[in-house]
Amino acid sequence: MNVQNDALVSIIAPCYNEEAVLHHFMNEIDPILTANSHPFELIFINDGSNDHTLEKLLELKNKYDYIRVINLSRNFGKEAAMTAGIDMAKGEALIPIDVDLQDPPHLIKEFIEKWHEGFDVVLAKRVDRSSDTKAKRKSAELFYKFHNSISHVKIPNNVGDYRLMSRKVITAIQSLPENQRFMKGVFAWVGFNTTTVEYVRDPRKAGETSFNGWKLWNFAVEGITSFSTVPLRVWLYVGFVIAFIALIFGAWIILKTLIFGVDAPGYASMTTIVLFLGGIQLMGIGILGEYIGRLYMEAKRRPVYIIDEEY
Ligand code: UDP
Ligand code: MG
């Protein structure tokens, strides 16, 4: 399909407590957007910030007429905020972007070029993550490895939400009814003709990251449980293996008793085995819990986000 030169491009920027960085963001992105031949809209989603982000956004909206501001009723999290933006966008191409300038706006030009070449998805791949801490890089790498080894949907490594998606892709994404959205997985799940452009990820311009330790861990659990049932099914095999070992061990004990008679000691090995199995069982139940919890939340059929007002 040919891309029309007057096709609208929607940029989607979720914001949570970003008052410090919004002006930098506009100064950087405005020349890039206006130099572009496509008409565009820039949609800010205020994700329940408790600083002056909304006021700042409304100020910016007065200054730049292509800005739209969507105010959510509270903080729903980045995935939900992005979903709100995707639902509100009218463009033929959509580009989610972080406002902290870790996603360099100059890539938008390359995104659009690739889109004209016929790609429906253009991913921005980080070639250098030295701006992230070593622990974050290592844990991200482990997560992708683990996720991709047990899930049919492979999430490309070192690719974030920053990308271009054509209307076709957006329509497909909107057809997914789940309301717990792990967007990286959702994006990968829909597929389509994909290419990548590379960039170096800068450190955050101002403000602070809202993703730390526990939140990232939960995000990873969400990602894995949304796109794989392997953690549920693995217990069948763990059970098999343990039962098999127990059988052999049992046979050996019976044999030993028959040949050498009863010998009472064995307290240490018994305790170890009981504790070990107890631990394994609790883990299994815990994982069941993760999935049942998600089923429960999903069964409520609550909306992903609630819009307070659109400006
Ligand atoms: N964000 C959001 N809601 C949240 C947390 C973050 O909309 O609950 C936005 C945030 O304003 C930023 C983007 O998501 O535009 C990425 O957040 P951040 O820079 O904190 O994450 P990191 O780059 O450290 O992964
Ligand atoms: Mg960031």
Image (spheres, rainbow, N blue to C red):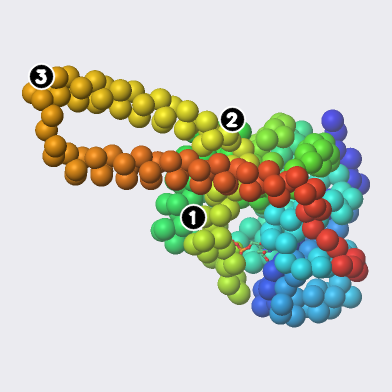
Q: Quadrant of residue 56?
A: bottom right
Q: Secondary structure at mark 1?
A: loop
Q: Alpha carbon of mark 2 to alpha carbon of mark 1: how far?
A: 26 Å
The residue that disc 1 covers is 129
Where does ligand 2 appear, by image quarter? bottom right
Report x, y in % for residue 4. 89, 40
Dot in front, 1 or 3: 3
Q: Residue at x 79, y 64 (%)?
A: 45
- Quickly name the residue at label 3: 259
Query: Could you tell whether 107 is left or right of 165 in the image?
Result: left
Residue at 15% of width from left, 24% of height from top?
A: 257
What number is the disc on residue 158?
none
Tell me what residue is drawn at x 8 percent, y 23 percent. 260
CB contact under 8 Å: marks 1 and 3: no
The three-letter code of the residue at mark 3 reads Ile
Residue 89 visible (yes or no):
yes
